[in-house]
Image: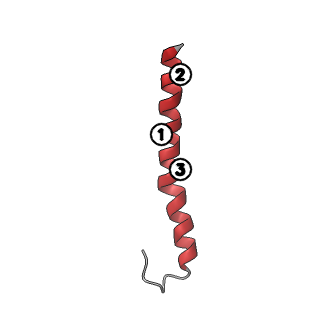
Amino acid sequence: MLQEIIAFGILLIAVGYLVKKFFWKSKKKKDCGDGNCGCS
């Protein structure tokens, strides 16, 4: 029982990390426009 809860918590942390890494950066790039502002 406790092992399942720990495994599920680690899974949630991993999924949250991947969402933060891949989706938040893409939203930031969209706000930049056509790339003329100098952000990369």
The residue pinned by badge 3 equals 19
Mark 2, mark 1: which one is toward the viewer? 2
Looking at the image, what colour scheme do you see? secondary structure
Q: Residues within 10 Å of mark 2 (few under 14, many from 20)?
A: few
Q: Is residue 33 above or below residue 13?
A: below
Q: What kind of residue is marked 2?
A: Ile
* Residue at x-position 53% and y-position 60%: 24
Q: Residues within 10 Å of mark 3 (few under 14, many from 20)?
A: few
In this image, 17 relative to 33: left or right? left
Q: Residue at x 54, y 13 (%)?
A: 1
The Cα atoms of the two marked residues, 3 and 1, are separated by 9 Å
Residue at the extreme bottom: 36
Looking at the image, tell me whether mark 3 or mark 1 is earlier in sequence order: 1
Q: Quadrant of residue 39?
A: bottom left
Q: In this figure, which residue is indicated by the disc labeled 2?
A: 5
Which sits earlier in the primary sequence, circle 2 or circle 1? 2
Q: Is 12 above or below relative to 20?
A: above
What is the quadrant of the C terminus in the image? bottom left
At x 51% / y 30%, what residue is drawn?
9
Label 2: state its secondary structure.
helix
Q: Residue 13, how many percent across, how many down?
A: 49, 38
Amino acid type indicated by mark 3: Val
Q: Which structural element holds mark 1? A: helix
Identify the disc placed on residue 14. Answer: 1
Q: Are marks 3 and 2 in contact (CB under 8 Å)?
A: no
- Secondary structure of the residue carrying tag 3 is helix
- At 53% from the left edge and 78% from the top edge, which residue is drawn? 32
Report the mark closest to the observer, 3 or 2. Answer: 2
